[in-house]
Amino acid sequence: RYAGYLRADGVAIVNRRRIVPVTVSAGNAKYPEDVEERLKTRFGRLILVDGGHLARETGNVRTENVVLLGTLSRFLEIPLRAWEGAIARLVPKRALEANLRAFSLGRKQVR
């Protein structure tokens, strides 16, 4: 939906999890079968992340966005220590370990 905002030399980080629009679930539209192929032809650099699967690996499915944040962090010139510090400040203590693991798993998606 926001693909037009990405620079030609930008990186698209896309979660593989399907989010079915109401129009599809109501039967008024069909979910495209070739989403990944369309994305590959549209973006010069595409990173597909199975955020849901990786979040489940942490034991906390609510860390899915942190997985994607970890992937994003590989492209920004912000020190790893700053990312981890921000997560530690913003995430409740009981969920900190899972979120730091999710962040690390996300970072590993970029080679």
Image (cartoon, grey):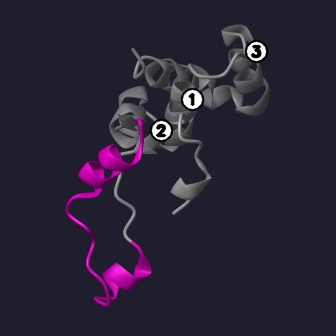
**Residue 4 versus residue 10 in the image, above or below:** below
**Residue 95 versus residue 101 in the image, above or below:** below
> Number of numbered discs present?
3
The residue sitting at the left extreme is 33
Cα–Cα span, label 1 and label 3: 14 Å
Asked whether 106 or 74 is in front, the reply is 74
Please give the name of the residue rendered at 55% of the width and 25% of the height, measured from the top-left corner. Answer: 70
Q: Nearer the viewer, mark 1 or mark 3?
A: 1
Q: Earlier in the sequence, mark 1 or mark 3?
A: 1
Please give the name of the residue rendered at 33% of the width and 80% of the height, measured from the top-left corner. Answer: 24
Pointer 1 residue? 72
Q: Earlier in the sequence, mark 3 or mark 2?
A: 2
- Image quarter where the C terminus lies is top left
Which region shows up in magenta?
A: 21-44
Q: Percent x, y for residue 9?
A: 53, 34
Q: Amino acid at mark 2?
A: Ile
Pointer 3 residue? 82
Pointer 2 residue? 13
